[in-house]
Amino acid sequence: MMKKICAVSGVEFEISDRDIAYYEKVGVPLPSLCPPERVRRRMAYRNERNLYKSKCAFSGEQLLSMYHPDDGYTIYEKDIWISDKWDGVSFGREFDFGKGFFGQFRELSKVVPRANLAIFVNNENSEYCNYVGDVKNSYLCFGSIFIEDCMYGNPYYSKNCVDCFLIRKSELCYECIDCEGLYNCLFLQDSLECRDCSFGFDLKGCNNCVGCVGLRNKQYQIFNKQYSREDYEKFVGQFSFCDKEKVAFVLGKLEELKMQHPHRGVVSVNCENVTGNFLFNSKNCFDCFQVMENEDCSYNIQTTTSKDCYDMNFTEENELCYEYLGNYRNYKAVFCLLPYGCNDIWYSEYLTNCKNCFGCVGLKNKQFCILDKQYSESEYHEMVGRIINLMKEQGEFGEFFPVKNSPFCYNETVAFDYFSLSKEEALARGYRWREDGEADFRSATISEVADRIEDVTDSILNEILACEVSGRNYKIAPAELKFYRRMGLPIPKKHFFERLKVRLAKRLPYALFARKCDKCGADMQTPYSGIRLEKVYCEQCYLKEVY
């Protein structure tokens, strides 16, 4: 065990003997940044939902892009980008040993074409989605796979879900957060295998429950009290999601119950020797969050089916990868962005089925390339050794891409969602900042929207609305209106960005704090900091309480 001082935050952090052995195995020096600053730096390279009108540099056709047209990147429409109509090696260049690596890589990344959106496979009628795969008839969904008829959020393996955050295997859900296996549920959080429930927290196997917390395999409950089926249905029949006063009353009662009922220190299901939160079917994983089927990993967030991987986000099916963001099925992708099916690649982005590449951009099915230039095997290894020595001399090797090289401004990225900074703070750290465009803040074409969905006509589809919080414009899509009518929900008065902020504020941070169990006094590590007022129990005490 050793301790270091983070080069950005100045905070002391620990590097365990296990970590040191891993860095030696991968062949990288010890990190200079603490884990939170490392994940912030990576997340600053991912813009999910800020989309702009742009033009394909290949065809000249108009398109939607995650890259702002003023930033000077070469953008191809996704289908052209994945085709054989162009070849990345045509942009190859000699490495200049008189210059630093990161500067040369940035120059290359500005000219090599990149896809307008990160739509990996099988996109059908979902042009306004980004970082998705196997998606059908969906709108403004980000980071999702295998979804259909979904809008506004990042569901997985789900159908007909709107305004949800990290829900899986669910259908007909609205405003649900960190849930799995739901059907016809609204306003649930941290819940599993429920149906026909609303306004709930930490429910499992429940049916027909309203305003409940911490229940297991219950039905016909209201505010954690048992009702007959007839009385329950009478309450539900008199309730309306469009009645602001009734909704506020239920939410108020729910918050009271959440403060009275013990909270689970961490969510860890079928795991062995792990720390973090929301870990499932994992082993020997530390400081990991929202991971499933991970083994021998640390500092991962939102990863699935990974082994021997550190510092990864938003990815699946990887092994021996380090400081890596996005896409999947790679072996030893180190300091990389969005590679797919690659082996032994370093400091590269948007590579597909490549191996033994260093500092490359946009290549497909290539081997032994540096800055997109082809080399023989012996030339490649000799050059890589020299480049690494130069990077070590200049303090570059072992660091992820610097913040100034990100194609996105800080407030465009998911880093801003999880690690909020003011404009002044972001600029002081070397990040860029994007001011809102005036075109997004026009006057609304309708002064007031009816509260009751029954009073909303199809004419709403032709109106421009203005967010009651930010003033940002938005519109209602036909499928969206159909969903609200089906579920008895009011037209939202806030823009999607503001609705997302509310959901994020309800979630626990990707961090662990030392705290004592409020039941037995045992020491534990939990995302609930000591200043939070909820009752938090260790796993043993929590299970005794709820079962």
Image (cartoon, rainbow, N blue to C red):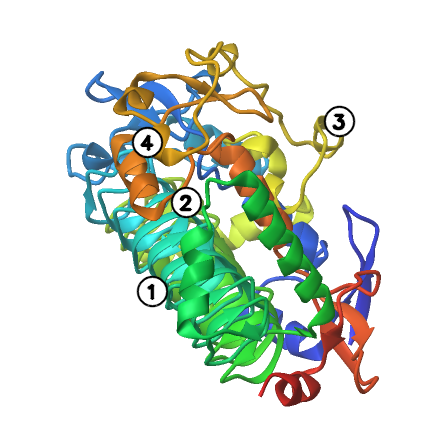
Query: Mark 3: few, some, or many residues within 10 Å (few <14, many ≥20)?
Result: few
**Residue 148 vertical position relative to residue 403 in the rendered view, above or below:** below
- Which residue is the site of mark 3? 424
Disc 1 vs disc 3: Cβ atoms closer than 8 Å? no
Q: Which mark is residue 125?
A: none
- Which residue is the site of mark 1? 169
Q: Secondary structure at mark 4?
A: loop
Give the x, y percent position of residue 272: 55, 87
Closer mark to the observer between disc 4 and disc 2: 4
Q: Secondary structure at mark 1?
A: loop
Query: Mark 2: few, some, or many residues within 10 Å (few <14, many ≥20)?
Result: many
Quadrant location of the N terminus? bottom right
Give the x, y percent position of residue 187: 49, 54
Give the x, y percent position of residue 226: 53, 76
For image coordinates 58% across by 72% down, the residue present is 224
Identify the mark nearer the N-term, 1 or 3: 1
Give the x, y percent position of residue 39: 61, 52
Q: Secondary structure at mark 3?
A: helix
Q: Which mark is residue 116?
A: 4
Closer mark to the observer between disc 1 and disc 3: 1
**Residue 9 vertical position relative to residue 222 in the rendered view, above or below:** above
- Which residue is the site of mark 2? 349
